[in-house]
Amino acid sequence: MIRILGISAFYHDSAACIVIDGEIIASAQEERFDRVKHSAKFPINAIKYCLEEGGLNIDDVDAIVFYDKPFLKFERLLQTYYAFAPKGLFSFLTAMPIWLNEKLFLKYKIYKGLREIDTYERKNINLLFSGHHLSHAASAFYPSPFRDAAILTIDGVGEWATTSISKGTGRNIEVLKEMEFPHSVGLLYSAFTYFLGFKVNSGEYKIMGLAPFGNVEKAGEYISKITTEIVDIKNDGSIWLNQDYFNYATGLQMIKPKKWGKLFGLSKRVPDTAINQQHCDIALAIQTVLENIVIKMAKEAKRLTNADFLCLAGGVALNCVANIKLFELKLFKDIYVQPAAGDAGGALGAALAVYHMYYNKYRHVSADAMKGAYLGPSFRETDIIALNKKEKAVYTKFDDFSMLSSFIASKINQGKVIGWFQDRMEFGPRALGNRSILADARNPKMQNLINKQVKFRESFRPFAPVILIEDVSKYFEFDRHSPYMVFTPKLKNYLRRPLPDNFNNSSLKTKLDYEKSDLAATTHVDFSSRIQTISKEQNPRLWSLINNFKSLTDCPILLNTSFNVRGEPIVCTPEDAYRCFMNSGLDFLVIDLYIYDKTEQH
């Protein structure tokens, strides 16, 4: 038996994972435990959980693997400052103490962090380091259902690589081509995230959500400026970024705001200020540029590997709009996207890479090695009872889940918004039905209501529909299982509402308020939806709830969004769930077989 602990930490989205004989036993982000969104801390709590789930002590682990190689990152940092000198002196003086104090003594920090978890014999620790992009590639290929596949990894930057094309064959991964820093698709997209007033490394999906509200003609003008002045796109998808417009290589900001303001005729948006049409047009422009680059990269991956299948990882792989464009090209027979495609998934990939490539162990291919991404902690009834006593909560307990499911389905049909907490927590950025907020996707008021009164966030933010797998092809132009919200297919024509004349030139508010389909709360302006399909085998309780809702309404779809409010991680514990329930506009909370009605709480 070989037991491997994977760790990612010290940048963003710290996480841990336990793999035993190639099987993913547990995986979780540190943010869910320390309640700091995108926590970069050494994942003490996540490691504790993973060890407990695996029934292990630190001494039981055969190898501990970190998801990247800090000395190569340090080399890149030094060479970059040298190349740009004398620019960046202040940034250099700011960065060096951090690197010297923390990053270069990473082994010491790991050993120290492990000491806070448990005692262990240091001489028995086999501490390994995986390449950043290898960790990403492994996180996608090894859990995929493909024996052989092309692997495309796109993110901001690892050690040097910003994009890599690899080929996975059996237990092995071979890197075929890389693009290196400072030229990066992920950093290009993050630069626009910053310019449009959102937070880098967490707000990129807001650009994707804002893009459909853009005016196609105006976006075309911005695309021309972007591809003329900012980025040169080669036929193989590699890019050259004009560093005259950027400041991330040696500065303390992503961009040079004055140059961007002059180019686009718009100042950098101040966070939390109003979003206007020009912001939407720029978002559409960079989203379109990204899609063009990703498609070119995928074509190059096909050329280099001649593979029938493609695996995607790295933060850019979470751009589900680009993913569906790629899927619809039919370059590959099928595409697998790692649901935790960002740095959190690096912990998982590093562990799998060590198992298959370091220990040279056989790879068992399965339909869903990620287990629906339900890899986090579950909680006992005693935990719920303790919560009820502590909070003096008023509740109703059902003895039969089918009765609970029927009751909640009826409440959703009445327009109520439900906090839904069941079984094991999801790994990755998406709530997939165990730590979710659920509502009626047909209700045209629901998107605005949940954004404003429940999540406390921007009104344009879209929501995902979760649909029974047996019904997906009846509602969407899509016929595959998509359990991880990584594709945005279009709604069938018969469900769409005709758009008014000149709709493309309408304001953001007008586009938001217009009922675009029979599933108004989960349909984007372009009639697409970030779908999640659900099967009875994958998640029997969520399937039962949706099936009851279907019996009641003839609609096999619910709105599904993450169980959290703006600025907070997804809930982990029953206490997290109850606190979020009480401090938001949720109407009901369901924890296992317990139901809490907001109107009855003290």
Image (spheres, rainbow, N blue to C red):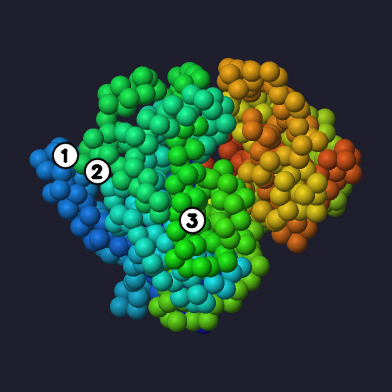
Mark number displayed over residue 88: 1
Q: Mark 3 points at which residue?
A: 298
Rendered location of residue 393, percent (x, y): 70, 37
Q: What residue type is labelled 2?
A: Ala
What kind of residue is marked 1?
Gly
Q: Is residue 228 left or right of residue 372?
A: left
Report the residue at 48% width, 28% height from top: 219
Horizontally, residue 111 falls left or right of residue 537, namely left
Name which residue lies at 64% across and 30% down. 525
Measured Cα–Cα span from mark 1 to mark 3: 35 Å
Do the CB atoms of the residues marked 2 and 1 lie less than 8 Å apart?
yes
Whether residue 181 is visible to the viewer of this picture, yes or no, is yes
Sooner in the amino-acid sequence: mark 2 or mark 3: 2
Circle 2 packing at 10 Å, graded few (<14), some (14-19), many (20+), is many
- Is residue 432 depicted above or below 448 in this figure? below
Q: Is residue 162 rendered to the left or right of residue 473? A: left
The image's mark for residue 249 is 2
Mark 2 element type: loop
Which mark is first along the chain, 1 or 2?
1
Residue sitting at x 71%, y 24%? 499
Residue 133, x across and y down, in percent = 39, 60
From the top left corner, tell me how far across and down residue 358 is, in percent.
40, 78
Q: Residues within 10 Å of mark 3 (few under 14, many from 20)?
A: many
